[in-house]
């Protein structure tokens, strides 16, 4: 994690002139997010497998929503940012809406209903090849009472022969149905124009929050309790929860007020396999989970405290650290942990989590709410460390004293010298050492440990890179 060269960052290598270090003078800055402008919201609803997620991807102009030729792939309500004719708006993709559904499908339908309640306009997607079913007629009755603009998209009109089937959808009483093909893009431009016309002048919900909340990714293996924890934090059934592992497929964004501060939490799909070995829906869900981690500032990795640590747990932790994100480890289901399991877990932590000893840890129960409120202070501590920048003068004064007391080990009969150092960047803190020779991995770990003791980087990874000075050639070309 921190004991290998950062080749991908372009920081390891050689240097020939001390003036070169000026580009790493430690005075870098971070871009502040501008205040978001309120955007209208479009909810895309319909029964399962009518092509909602395919249409969402078409409206966005990019592949975002998970799509597979199996009903019920989308289960939560997922927000995506869209742009058409210079106007920005938010698209809510939802799971299949089946009125009076029970169990998992009932929870999915509830998410669709909540999306409709929060939207400024609703887009009902119908399979033109099937026509209006009893489900669509029931949905139409709800939409007619909603007092929101409603558009009907007759999807899967892939050729002119299907165009005549569209007129039957007038029976829904929601206005003129628009023939489209989400797969081929036919009619999508006209549909987007109609969507913009349907939006009110002022969005229903004002969501601007200054510079924006800090972004937190909830990650972990399947069925570890991520969605349950998100629902506990939000105080509502924000994410679909079921005892079946893998219920969450897309990342789910939620604004959560915790300890007097608003955070943006992202619930992600549980990671079973490496992205390279996953397939189908799981492959795209893994890609989106990886993207959610990279888009976040801090990650809460949930681990089932009642079960032994697994390879999946360690893989998720590695993914977060390699992404350079601040880290909080939450041991969930603590209400199921007895004394014997606690002692066993302590041994597992000492043995398997030695490389993330710096991470903040908390024992929680999403079911009972135990210690959930303690996550906010830990998140702040981790983010403060992640944002920390050490002035170059202070860093070099500390480093010269440390190296004098504990010089690098001899390598190849010569002892390398550490000439000076600078913090190349924060988020995560990355330090570049300019030396006369390569520093062993063990010495880098020693430096990291001392950095943490001196400057307190609790909750954040620390990266150390070495740049070795090239020996100058004499007039005969010898070094």
Image (cartoon, rainbow, N blue to C red):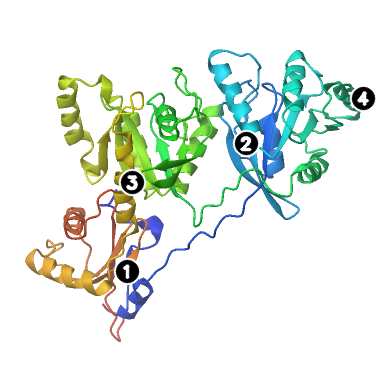
Task: Classify mark 3: residues with Cα within 10 Å, few (<14), some (14-19) or many (20+).
Answer: many
First of labels 1, 4 by sequence position: 1
- In front: mark 3 or mark 2? 2
Looking at the image, which residue is at 51% across and 59% down? 33
Q: Which residue is mark 1?
A: 14
Q: Which residue is mark 4?
A: 164
Left or right, 147 with reference to 170? left
- In front: mark 4 or mark 2? 2
Q: CA distance from mark 1 to mark 3?
A: 37 Å
Dot 1: what SS? strand
The C terminus: image quadrant: bottom left
First of labels 1, 3 by sequence position: 1
- In front: mark 3 or mark 4? 3
Q: Position of residue 6 (x, y in %)?
A: 34, 56
- In front: mark 1 or mark 2? 2
Q: Which residue is mark 2?
A: 118
First of labels 3, 4 by sequence position: 4
First of labels 3, 2 by sequence position: 2
Q: Is residue 90 above or below residue 144?
A: below
First of labels 4, 2 by sequence position: 2
Q: Is residue 136 above or below residue 456?
A: above
Q: Which mark is residue 379?
A: 3
Dot 3: what SS? helix
Q: CA distance from mark 1 to mark 4?
A: 70 Å
């Amino acid at each position: 994690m921190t004991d290998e060269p950062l080749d991908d960052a372009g920081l390891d290598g050689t240097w020939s002139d001390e003036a070169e270090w000026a580009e790493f003078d430690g005075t870098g800055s971070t871009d502040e997010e501008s205040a978001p402008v309120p955007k209208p919201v479009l909810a895309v609803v319909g029964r399962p497998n009518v092509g909602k997620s395919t249409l969402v991807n078409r409206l966005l102009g990019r592949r975002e929503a998970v799509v597979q030729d199996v009903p019920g792939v989308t289960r939560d309500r997922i927000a995506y940012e869209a742009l058409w004719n210079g106007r920005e708006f938010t698209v809510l993709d939802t799971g299949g809406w089946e009125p009076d559904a029970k169990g998992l499908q009932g929870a999915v339908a509830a998410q669709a209903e909540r999306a409709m309640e929060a939207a400024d306009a609703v887009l009902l997607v119908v399979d033109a090849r099937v026509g209006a079913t009893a489900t669509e007629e029931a949905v139409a009755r709800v939409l007619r009472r909603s007092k929101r603009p409603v558009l009907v998209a007759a999807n899967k009109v892939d050729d002119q022969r299907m165009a005549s089937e569209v007129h039957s959808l007038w029976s829904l009483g929601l206005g003129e149905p628009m023939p489209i093909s989400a797969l081929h893009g036919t009619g999508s431009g006209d549909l987007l124009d109609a969507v913009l016309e349907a939006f009110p002048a002022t969005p229903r919900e004002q969501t601007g929050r200054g510079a924006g909340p800090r972004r937190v990714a909830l990650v972990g293996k399947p069925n570890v309790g991520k969605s349950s924890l998100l629902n506990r934090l939000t105080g509502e059934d924000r994410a679909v929860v079921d005892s079946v592992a893998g219920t969450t497929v897309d990342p789910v964004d939620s604004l959560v007020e915790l300890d007097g501060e608003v955070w943006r939490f992202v619930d992600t799909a549980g990671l079973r396999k490496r992205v390279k070995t996953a397939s189908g829906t799981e492959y795209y869900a893994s890609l989106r989970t990886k993207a959610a981690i990279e888009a976040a500032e801090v990650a809460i990795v949930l681990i089932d405290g009642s079960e032994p640590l697994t390879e999946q747990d360690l893989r998720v932790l590695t993914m977060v650290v390699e992404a350079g994100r601040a880290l909080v480890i939450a041991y969930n289901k603590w209400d199921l942990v007895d004394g014997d399991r606690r002692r066993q877990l302590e041994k597992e932590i000492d043995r398997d989590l030695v490389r993330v000893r710096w991470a903040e840890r908390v024992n929680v129960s999403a079911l009972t709410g135990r210690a959930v409120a303690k996550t906010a202070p830990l998140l702040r501590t981790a983010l403060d460390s992640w944002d920390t920048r050490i002035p170059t003068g202070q860093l070099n004064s500390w480093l010269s004293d440390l190296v004098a007391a504990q010089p690098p080990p001899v390598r190849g009969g010569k002892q390398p010298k550490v000439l000076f150092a600078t913090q190349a960047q924060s988020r995560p803190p990355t330090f570049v050492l300019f030396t006369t020779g390569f520093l062993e991995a063990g010495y880098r770990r020693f430096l990291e440990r001392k950095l943490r003791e001196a400057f307190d980087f609790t909750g954040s990874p620390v990266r150390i890179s070495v740049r070795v000075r090239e020996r100058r050639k004499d007039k005969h070309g010898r070094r």
